[in-house]
Image (spheres, rainbow, N blue to C red):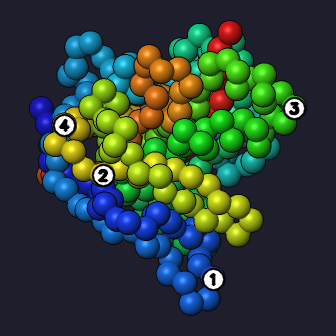
Amino acid sequence: MSVRAEVSYLSRQNERPFYYIHGPPEGEPYSNVHGDRRDVEVQNARTYTPRPALDREGVELVGFTDTPEDEHDATELTEDFYPKVEKLVAEKTGATRVHAFDHNLRSSDKSATEGTSVLAPVWLVHNDYTETSGPQRVRDLLGEEADDLIGRRFAVINCWKPIHGTAFDAPLAVCDAQTIHSSDRVETDLRYPDRTGEIYSFSYSEEHRWFYYPEMTPDEALLIKGYDSAADCARFTAHTAIRPSGSDPDAPPRRSLEVRTLAFFD
């Protein structure tokens, strides 16, 4: 069974797209992007045979019961939860080394995000890394080791999971990586006060095939491919939060935790 949902692509433009993440300098706009909202069919991936796989569609649903007792405790997250995510990614991918380096807490409850470190869901079709920013992240984090590690296969893999209840509201939808062409990817700058990051936004294509996992529970997680140096598998995975047609407007807000990892292969 499928649903309909509106997703936000980017329109083609001559200027390089950008967003200021913590507010623009005086006199400059927050962003120069031009949105392209599309109503798309989103299929229920729980009905798929075979099940979507990380190296084929770019995403994989896995069982993962671990959840931090206090997701706001940075020490617990980095010292206890990160190693559990690293173990999960290694087991599911065959990576010989996994380094968890970052996380985001998100909530679809606006009151939970105001004045806190909790972020809102991302309603833009995007991928967290690009051909350039994937390897750069290794250089930023691993210093002298980076050149050797980049010389072998490596990937950026996100572990995304609901916390504090089932994700009824604002579930995550994914575009099958097999249906995305390089011409659909749009390099987009994220301008921070001290640096500029780079992600992919996406332009619309009728070939894109969208799917999601309805009602994900805290015992489940999605592994999402954000970058892969290998050329013979899914390398980038467009995704976005959605509000499926027929959603219950009174559904409890979604709360989620995502951890980014670098996975290295021999």
Say which amino acid is labelled 1: Pro
Q: Residue 5, percent across and down?
A: 20, 51
Element class at badge 1: loop
Instruction: Give the label on residue 25, or none.
Output: 1
In primary-sequence order, the first of circles 1 and 4 is: 1
Q: Which residue is mark 2?
A: 203
Say which amino acid is labelled 4: Glu
Q: Which residue is mark 3?
A: 144
Say which amino acid is labelled 3: Glu
Element class at badge 2: loop
Residue drawn at (59%, 42%), measured in percent from left and top?
Answer: 132
| Distance from the alpha carbon under mark 2 to that under mark 1 | 28 Å
Say whether marks 1 and 3 touch (CB < 8 Å).
no
Report whether 128 appears left or right of 140. left
Q: Quadrant of the N terminus?
A: top left
Instruction: Give the label on residue 207, or none.
Output: 4
Q: Residue 171, percent across and down?
A: 34, 45
| Distance from the alpha carbon under mark 2 to that under mark 3 | 37 Å
Element class at badge 4: loop
In primary-sequence order, the first of circles 2 and 3 is: 3
Q: Residue 103, percent across and down?
A: 63, 45
Q: Quadrant of the C terminus?
A: top right
| Distance from the alpha carbon under mark 4 to that under mark 2 | 11 Å
Compared to residue 143, the image places residue 24 above or below, namely below
Residue drawn at (29%, 61%), measured in percent from left and top?
Answer: 11
Q: Nearer the viewer, residue 98 or 12?
A: 12
Say whether marks 2 and 1 touch (CB < 8 Å).
no
